[in-house]
Image: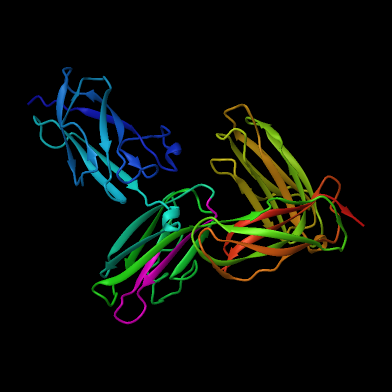
Amino acid sequence: TNIKTSEIFSQVPVNTVLSGFLAVPGFGIGINDREGVAVGTGYTRTYTFVRTKGGSKPITYTVSWVDNDGTFAAAGTLALPLNNPVSFPVTITPATSGAHSAILNIDDPGTAGIDYQTMNVVVAADTFTAAENYSVTKSGTLGPQQVKSYYFYVPAGTPAFKVDMVGGGAAGLGAIRFLRWHPYGVGIDSNAVSNCYNPSIGGCSTGSALSRTTSNPQAGVWEVTVDARRNSDAVSAPFTLTASILGATVSPNPDVISSATIGVPVARSYTITNLFGPFTGRAVGVALGSAYRATPTIANHSQQTFSINVASGSTSLRATIGSPSDPAADLDLFVYNCTSGTCVLAGQSADGDSEESVTVANPAAGNWLVLIDGFSVPAGTTSYNYVDVFANPAFGSVIVTDANALRASGASWIVPGTVTANAAPAAGRVLLGAVQVRTDTNVLVGSGDVIVESVTP
C-alpha cells in the first residue's frame, strides 16, 4: 500500500495581554482572542495554512466545526497546494457574553481520520458603562461541584475592581464562593478546597468571602468564577454576583502651594468626584515627604540613575515613572539600597510598559539609588515623568476632614483641609503629600498630589 501522509501548519493573529510573548508575537496556531471582542460585533480572523508534505497536487479538505455555538463561520472546503501558503478567513460573531470555543477540523475525505485540528476561543467580556453605574450583575444557581465563569473588561487606569457576592451561608442555601483570575490567567485568590466559601470553612486568605477589591488592577479581561463545594447542602444554590469598577478624582490635582511658613497651617479645600461605581468611603490626607520631580529623556537601551539621601526615621521610599512621550516604550525601574556602602537591589518594577513604581517600607537612612533602564524605545528616545519621595513625619502633614459615607456614581463632595510644613527639604527637592480617596475597607480609589514648592522659617 502506498500511503501518502500530509503535514499541515497554521498561523492566525491572536489577542491576549500575553500574546506579545508568543514565539511569533501576536500569532498562534488557533484563534485565541481574550481581548477586544464585543457581544454582537462581528470581525474576521484570517488563517494562513501551509501543507508541507504529501502529494504534489493540491488537496481539497473538508472544513467542519466541533461544538460551535454559531460564533464561528467559514467556508466548508480548503484547497492546499504543496508548500504554498493559503489564506482562510473565519468570521467571528459572539451572540452572548462569555467564552465561546470550537474545534476546527480539516479532513481529507479520502483518508482515515482527521488531518489537522485547531482550538479556537474568543471571550466576549461584559463592560462597565455609565448607564449601569459601572456595575455588572450576574445571577444563577449552582449544584454541588458546579462552576460558572464570568468575564469583565477592566479599562486601563482603573483604580479598583470590586466583586461582591450574595449567596450561600445559611443552612440549605449551599456552600459557594467566587474566585478572581488575572488577565494573565493566574489566580488572585487561592483555589484551595477550603478557601473563601460562604459559609466559612477555612477563612478567606485575600479578604471577605462576600466582597473583595483589587487595587490598581491590570487592564484587560478578568475572569470571575463561582463554584459550589462538592458537599454543598443545596441541590440548586442561588447566587448573585456584582462586579464594579471604582475610581475618584481629587481637584485641584496637583494642589501647588508656592510657599509655606514652618509650623503655620495653610487652609485648603478639595473637591472629590466619584467617576465610576458607588462605594462607601472618604478622603484622607497623606503626610508630607521630600520629593524630586523631573521629566528626563532616555534613549533606547540606555540607563539613567538618581541618588536619594533618605533621612533617618523615614517611613517609606517610593520611586515612580510613567507617561512616556513614546507610548510604545518599555522602561524598567530598579531601586538599590546603598546605605552599607554596597548597592543591593531592594525592589524592581519591570513589565511590558513604562508605568512602573517601587515602594520600600521603613527605608534605612542614607544613600539610595534609582536606576531607569530604557529596555525598549522604538522612537529612539522618549521623555517620561519621574518622581522619588521619602515620607517622614518631620516634614509635616496634609490633614482633611471627612468621614465614610455612601458615594453614588457621579457624586461630588467638598472636604476642607490644612497643609502644614514643619521642615524644609534638601536643595532641589520639594515637599510632596497627597489627598487620597479610600473605601471603608481602606482600598485606594483615587489620589491627588499636594506640593509645597518652598518652605520659609
Which of the colour schemes (rainbow, by chain, secondary structure, one colour) is used?
rainbow
Q: Is residue 361 magenta?
A: no
Residue at the (20%, 20%) spot, across then down: 81
Give residue 391's quadrant in the image.
bottom right
| Viewer-proximal residue among 33 and 91 | 91
Q: Is residue 14 visible?
A: yes
Q: Extreme left residue here? A: 1
Q: Position of residue 369 (x, y in %)?
A: 74, 46
Q: Nearer the viewer, residue 271 or 59?
A: 271
Q: Is residue 63 above or below residue 350?
A: above
Residue 397 in sight here: no
Residue 265 horizontal/vertical position (percent) = 82, 63
Quadrant housing residue 270: bottom right
- Image x and y of residue 71, in percent: 24, 43
Q: In the displayed structure, does residue 407 sit left or right of residue 233?
A: right
Residue 210: x and y in percent read 43, 70
Farthest-out residue, bottom: 171
Q: Residue at x 81, y 48 (%)?
A: 429
Please indicate whether residue 455 sits to the left or right of residue 342 in the image: right
- What is the quadrant of the N terminus in the image? top left
Residue 168 sits inside the magenta stretch = yes
The quadrant the C terminus occupies is bottom right
Extent of the magenta region: 158-178
Q: Residue at x 53, y 58 (%)?
A: 410
Q: Report the front residue among 69 and 129.
A: 129
Q: Residue furthest right?
A: 457
Looking at the image, is 75 positioned above or below residue 166? above
Would you place residue 446 above or below residue 30 in this image?
below
Left or right: residue 295 versus residue 158 is right
Q: Splitting the image into 4 quarters, where does residue 85 fall?
A: top left
Residue at point 15%, 32% (across, down): 76
